[in-house]
Amino acid sequence: MEIDGYKATIEYDPEIEMYRGEFVRLKGGADFYAADIEGLRREGAASLRVFLEACQRRGIEPRKSYSEKLDVRVPAEANQAVSVECSTG
């Protein structure tokens, strides 16, 4: 689900028989609950608003920042093949 440009994941919680949404890629938690999609959108917008207002008051950027570096583990054979290919042009 996306609300005001912020993406949220949605899961069903069978213990309380409600859906739980949580915004991703934020520097803090902003979750919300509802029984249906309309309620999720409404509660999500309210939760996001409160979170963004708190960030603004504290002078905090709400979104997580990411570097351009990505570490990936691959089998040694694949690493060697890439290394050889890159060095031979």
Image (cartoon, grey):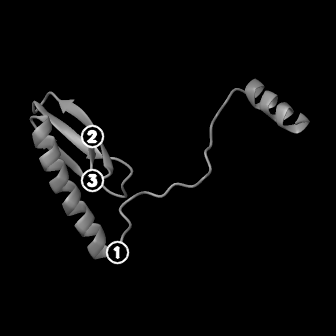
Mark seen at residue 32: none
Comparing 77 with 46, the one in front is 46
Regarding mark 1 in the picture, which secondary structure is present there?
A: loop
Q: Quadrant of residue 15 in the image?
A: top left
Q: Measure the alpha-carbon separation of dots 2 and 1.
A: 27 Å
Which is more foreground, mark 3 or mark 1? Answer: 3
Looking at the rendered image, the quarter that the C terminus falls into is top right
Q: Residues within 10 Å of mark 1 (few under 14, many from 20)?
A: few
**Residue type marked 1:** Gly
Residue drawn at point x = 19 percent, y = 49 percent:
44
Q: Position of residue 53 (x, y in %)?
A: 23, 68
Disc 1 target residue: 59
Q: Measure the alpha-carbon separation of dots 3 and 1.
A: 20 Å
Residue drawn at point x = 14 percent, y = 36 percent:
37
Looking at the rendered image, the quarter that the N terminus falls into is top left
Disc 3 target residue: 4
